[in-house]
């Protein structure tokens, strides 16, 4: 009989491939969670070894959660903050390129902790392991259709947990309000009233506090212009969440196209020294 080491050397790849084919998606995600997310929260408080991303062979679907960024994309201020100009062309210069200038907080973008936290982490200081997370999508679109100032509350999160189980460690929690249907119009997306006060959904500050103190969550995201709802003047959700070295994503797309539970989000955050955030390419796998 061959010794055990010889058997493993010869049969190991075949056995592993067979196992990979048999393991269900749910079991794969559970294993990935144990291997990858177990150390995520510690990444927020100290340096840790870089972790490998879960093998994509366990995922069957991918969804882009990113809006195309262009000069007409709605901004929080209502003023143009993203500009492009052709710098070189193939016909004239032999290659094509744009000059791009923008305010960091435009399009589908990240709010890094430093955006509202003096001394908190800037965008390039975020560990890769907190940019890969199981994602929970909390749907408030029916409520938001009637109440443009709707907010994600702790009760909304608890209702999600009653249906899908407790939020995984190191999760990201995203709000789906259906607001992206308005993104083609700056006025409709900003939704100002006659006094100029904007009205759109967001996370209630109590929810930020709940997720920070009672759950192990690395990031939150919205399909609107701000983590706080439109009428906010104190930006308490930002001020509660970001200084704790957590991140936020704004202007997400296609949240209705991913499952409420079971997907993973990958955040392609910029790596700009001293950055307070910036446009991201975000996608989900499940």
Image (cartoon, rainbow, N blue to C red):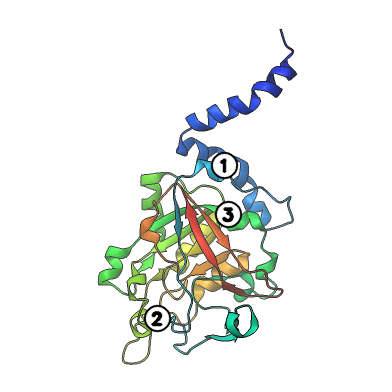
Q: Closest to the observer: 35 or 271?
A: 271
Residue neighbourhood size for the residue with mark 2, other residues' Cα within 10 Å, grouped as few (<14), some (14–19), many (≥20): some
Residue 64, label in figure: none
Label 2 or label 3, whichever lies nearer to me, is: 3
Residue 78 picture location, percent across and down: 44, 88
Judge whether residue 155 can be spotted in this image: no
Dot placed on the residue nearer the N-terminal end, 2 or 3: 3
Residue 132, label in figure: 3
Which residue is drawn at the image coordinates 31% and 74% (left, top)?
148
Q: Is 42 located above or below residue 207 in the figure?
A: above
Which residue is drawn at the image coordinates 37% and 46% (left, top)?
162
Left or right position of 193 against 276 = left
Judge whether residue 17 can be spotted in this image: yes
Dot placed on the residue nearer the N-terminal end, 2 or 1: 1
Give the CA separation, mark 2 to mark 1. Answer: 39 Å
Residue neighbourhood size for the residue with mark 3, other residues' Cα within 10 Å, grouped as few (<14), some (14–19), many (≥20): many
Left or right position of 28 against 114 = left
Which residue is drawn at the image coordinates 61% and 85% (left, top)?
92
Give the CA separation, mark 1 to mark 3. Answer: 11 Å
Q: Secondary structure at mark 3?
A: strand
Residue 6 picture location, percent across and down: 73, 18
Dot placed on the residue nearer the N-terminal end, 1 or 3: 1
Q: Quadrant of residue 177?
A: bottom left
Q: Secondary structure at mark 2?
A: loop
Residue 231, label in figure: 2
Residue under numbered circle 1: 32
Count of picture labels? 3
Residue at far bottom of view: 195
Residue neighbourhood size for the residue with mark 1, other residues' Cα within 10 Å, grouped as few (<14), some (14–19), many (≥20): some
Q: Is 46 located above or below residue 269 in the figure?
A: above
């Amino acid at each position: 009989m061959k010794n055990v080491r010889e058997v493993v050397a010869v049969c190991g790849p075949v056995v592993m491939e067979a196992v990979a084919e048999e393991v269900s998606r749910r079991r794969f995600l559970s294993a990935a969670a144990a291997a990858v997310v177990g150390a995520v929260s510690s990444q927020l408080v100290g340096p840790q070894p870089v972790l490998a991303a879960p093998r994509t062979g366990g995922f069957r679907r991918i969804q882009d959660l990113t809006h195309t960024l262009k000069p007409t994309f709605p901004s929080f201020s209502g003023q143009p903050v993203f500009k492009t100009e052709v710098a070189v062309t193939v016909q004239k210069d032999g290659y094509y390129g744009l000059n791009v200038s923008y305010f960091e907080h435009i399009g589908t973008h990240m709010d890094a902790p430093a955006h509202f936290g003096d001394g908190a982490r800037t965008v390039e200081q975020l560990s890769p392991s907190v940019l890969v997370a199981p994602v929970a999508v909390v749907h408030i679109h029916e409520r938001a259709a009637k109440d443009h100032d709707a907010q994600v509350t702790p009760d909304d999160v608890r209702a999600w947990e009653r249906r899908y189980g407790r939020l995984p460690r190191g999760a990201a929690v995203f709000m789906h309000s259906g607001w992206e249907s308005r993104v083609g119009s700056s006025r409709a997306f900003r939704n100002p009233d006659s006094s100029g006060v904007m009205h759109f959904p967001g996370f209630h500050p109590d929810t930020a506090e709940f997720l920070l103190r009672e759950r192990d969550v690395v990031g939150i995201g919205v399909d609107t212009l701000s983590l706080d709802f439109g009428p906010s003047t104190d930006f308490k959700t930002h001020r509660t969440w970001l200084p704790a070295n957590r991140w936020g994503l704004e202007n997400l797309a296609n949240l209705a196209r991913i499952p409420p539970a079971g997907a993973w989000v990958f955040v392609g955050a910029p790596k700009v020294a001293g950055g307070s955030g910036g446009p991201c390419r975000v996608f989900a796998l499940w």
